[in-house]
């Protein structure tokens, strides 16, 4: 009988790994041997920070960095001894016993489009447009493949809008080769102060606040169907028709339509999240997973980078002012409220929360008081869903320039998410041409 007291690195080097035992299976065996068999998470909330959050001003402060690299923010202690955060996420600092902070992520893609694709799919970006069915599915779409929604719920939701860069829709946000059935359903958040800057809504985001009666809606739907082409006409028309059918179902009778009505939320809870669209989107995410939607993605920032001028995380200019006054206060309040809400409802253990971003920001502060793109090292966060809180995985060096220990990739982070959801990262899926794809190239981090 072999020993189960292995680290992730030991496993990958060992004869156990060479013998063909997958790491998720190994981790499960190790947990069972210790009497702590883990139940997979039932649902997942993914928070995407479009533009690339500065790790130095959030979860990986660098008080010992060179003076010209250190930045303006101070450091605060958290609820966990030995873990420090930036001073401007004080609410989040109270929740570190729930968090696993990964401080050693890295990749080599410096542009936003490719970096989002790498971070949200776990793979390098191909050529082609955003809707190309040769693209890899997003992590949201992959999870939805393995989770059946509760009766009347949607398979996957993304809100409040998609991510763009100067008007160009970014690859990797859809179902890709899984097909249109696995495109996350777009949904508008029904309230909240908007992020400053440019956000691009289309006709495909559901808004369930339509001010028409059930009978009038059904009459209108029947008339529209009479003039529509047959459902089998073309793939793009099938996708639009699928959207219309879902909209009908959602409006007429569904737990999703009830979850969407944020005015039915306890005012104390709604106030806890804040009256900004960032907070109200996370409140809606909690209500949707509670209603049976398996996976919800919230894009937490202005939807179009538009040169970094809006309330997104692409802070090439006025980084410290923007982080201190516009970005971190909203995110700190909303994310902390989500963790509190899930815990109070007894949902945190069964709901995985994953915070994902493009990359980090450079140690060097540029001439516009900003930090530029830095994929060489950055941080992301996991909570709930069986993840052991109060821990940090990996580290960056003194200046936050490179991984110092535990270097890992977006694929490893994805593998960790899949494992938490009870999905084997080495699972093979097939596209519409029956070509096989292993869903993830990474290995799960030892965060359980």
Image (cartoon, rainbow, N blue to C red):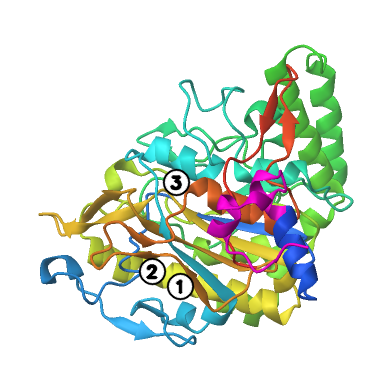
Alpha-carbon neighbours of circle 2 within 10 Å: few (<14), some, or many (≥20)? some
**Where 167 falls versus 227 (above or below)?**
below
Residue located at (49% from left, 87% from top) = 79
C-alpha span from label 1 to label 2: 6 Å
Examine the image and state in which quarter residue 8 appears. bottom right
3 or 1: mark nearer the eye:
1
Alpha-carbon neighbours of circle 1 within 10 Å: few (<14), some, or many (≥20)? some
Q: Position of residue 69 (x, y in %)?
A: 16, 65
C-alpha span from label 3 to label 2: 17 Å
Q: Is residue 438 left or right of residue 315?
A: right
Image quarter in which the C terminus is found: bottom right
**Where 282 falls versus 140 (above or below)?**
below
The residue that label 2 is drawn on is 328
Which structural element holds mark 2? helix
Magenta highlight range: 1-24
Q: Position of residue 27 (x, y in %)?
A: 70, 61
Q: Position of residue 420 (x, y in %)?
A: 69, 59
Q: Is residue 219 left or right of residue 427?
A: right
Which structural element holds mark 3? loop
Image quarter in which the N terminus is found: bottom right
Query: Is residue 278 shown in magenta?
Result: no
Q: Is residue 428 left or right of residue 231?
A: left
Residue in front for this viewpoint, 215 or 311 = 311
**Where 345 falls versus 418 (above or below)?**
below
Could you tell me if the residues under marks 1 and 2 are in contact, i.e. CB atoms within 8 Å?
A: yes
The residue that label 1 is drawn on is 332
Q: Is residue 148 visible?
A: yes
Residue located at (59% from left, 32% from top) = 136
Examine the image and state in which quarter residue 271 appears. bottom right
Residue in front for this viewpoint, 320 or 444 = 444
The residue that label 3 is drawn on is 303
Query: Is residue 2 shown in magenta?
Result: yes
């Amino acid at each position: 009988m072999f020993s189960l007291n292995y680290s992730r690195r030991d496993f990958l080097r060992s004869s156990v790994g060479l013998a063909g035992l997958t790491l998720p299976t190994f981790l499960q065996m190790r947990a069972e041997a210790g009497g702590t068999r883990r139940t997979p998470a039932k649902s997942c909330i993914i928070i995407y920070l479009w533009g690339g959050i500065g790790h130095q001003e959030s979860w990986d402060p660098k008080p010992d960095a060179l003076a010209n690299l250190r930045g303006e923010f101070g450091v605060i202690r958290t609820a966990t001894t030995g873990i420090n955060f930036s001073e401007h996420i004080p609410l989040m600092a109270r929740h570190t016993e729930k968090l696993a902070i990964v401080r050693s992520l890295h990749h080599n893609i410096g542009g936003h489009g490719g970096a989002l694709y790498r971070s949200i799919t776990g793979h390098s970006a191909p050529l082609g447009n955003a809707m190309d069915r040769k693209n890899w599915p997003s992590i949201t779409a992959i999870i939805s493949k393995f989770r059946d929604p509760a009766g009347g719920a949607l398979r996957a939701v993304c809100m409040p809008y998609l991510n763009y860069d100067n008007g160009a829709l970014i690859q990797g946000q859809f179902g890709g080769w899984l097909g249109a059935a696995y495109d996350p359903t777009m949904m508008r958040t029904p309230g909240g102060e908007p992020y400053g800057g440019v956000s691009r809504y289309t006709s495909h985001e559901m808004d369930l606040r339509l001010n028409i009666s059930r009978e009038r809606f059904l009459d209108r739907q029947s008339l529209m169907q009479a003039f529509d082409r047959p459902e089998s006409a073309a793939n793009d028309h099938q996708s639009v028709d699928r959207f219309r059918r879902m909209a009908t179902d959602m409006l007429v009778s569904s737990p999703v339509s009830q979850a969407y009505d944020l005015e039915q939320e306890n005012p104390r809870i709604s106030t806890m999240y804040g009256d900004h669209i960032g907070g109200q989107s996370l409140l809606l995410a909690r209500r949707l997973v509670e209603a049976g939607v398996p996976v919800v993605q919230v894009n937490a920032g202005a939807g179009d980078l538009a040169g970094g001028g809006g309330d997104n995380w692409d802070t090439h200019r006025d980084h410290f002012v923007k982080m201190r006054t516009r970005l971190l206060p909203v995110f700190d309040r909303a994310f902390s409220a989500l963790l509190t809400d899930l815990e109070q409802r007894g949902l945190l253990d069964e709901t995985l929360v994953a915070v994902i971003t493009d990359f980090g920001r450079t140690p060097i502060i540029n001439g516009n008081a900003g930090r530029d793109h830095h994929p060489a090292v950055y941080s992301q966060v996991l909570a709930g869903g069986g993840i052991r809180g109060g821990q940090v995985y990996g580290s960056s060096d003194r200046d936050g320039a490179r991984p110092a220990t535990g270097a890992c990739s977006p694929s490893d982070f994805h593998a960790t998410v899949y494992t938490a959801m009870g999905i084997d990262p080495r699972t093979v899926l097939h596209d519409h041409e029956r070509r096989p794809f292993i869903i993830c190239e990474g290995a799960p981090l030892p965060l359980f």
